[in-house]
Amino acid sequence: MSNVKSALSKRFEKTSDAPSKMDKLANQSSSGALSSFSGVFKIDELSLEERVSLETLLKTYREETQEISKDLEALSLITC
């Protein structure tokens, strides 16, 4: 009888090594993995065609002495 009792008590003991299911869910939720929007919005690099299009727009509407390289980099960062 004592073996059964010790076996049951070991079974119901909580192990501190492995994180609980609630801890895992809380971590996933805080990282946004459980959000209804997860996977909807992706961050992709600009394609060469998109980058050339931005560059063309900047060249078209720039002033004669205006350098567009910094503007192109800034636009590339916020549009990807």
Image: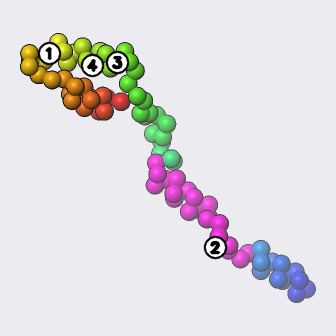
Q: Looking at the image, do the residues carrying marks 3 and 2 touch, with CB atoms under 8 Å apart?
A: no
Q: Is mark 4 in CB contact (under 8 Å) with mark 2?
A: no
Mark 2 or mark 1, which is nearer the start of the sequence? Answer: 2
Residue at 22% of width from left, 25% of height from top?
69
Q: Amino acid at mark 4?
A: Leu
Report, in whole angstroms, how far the alpha carbon at label 4 lies from the one at label 3.
6 Å
Name the residue that disc number 4 marks. 54
> On the image, numbered disc 1 is attached to which residue?
61
Amino acid type shown at disc 1: Tyr
Would residue 4 be found to the left or right of residue 42 on screen?
right
Q: Which residue is mark 3?
A: 50
Give yes or no for residue 23 being in the magenta stretch: yes
| Labelled disc at residue 11 | none
* Horizontal and vertical percent position of residue 23: 56, 62
Report the magenta residues as a range: 12-32
In this picture, is 9 found above or below 26? Answer: below
**The residue tagged with tag 2: helix, strand or loop?**
loop
Q: Nearer the viewer, residue 62 or 80?
A: 62
Q: CA distance from mark 1 to mark 3?
A: 17 Å
Disc 4 secondary structure class: helix
Discs 1/2, front = 1
Which residue, as the protein is rendered here, is positioned at the far bottom?
2
Q: Secondary structure at mark 3?
A: helix
> What amino acid type is highlighted by mark number 3?
Glu
- Labels 1 and 3 touching (C-beta < 8 A): no
Q: Residues within 10 Å of mark 1 (few under 14, many from 20)?
A: few
- The residue that mark 2 highlights is 16
Residue 10 against residue 76 in the figure, above or below: below
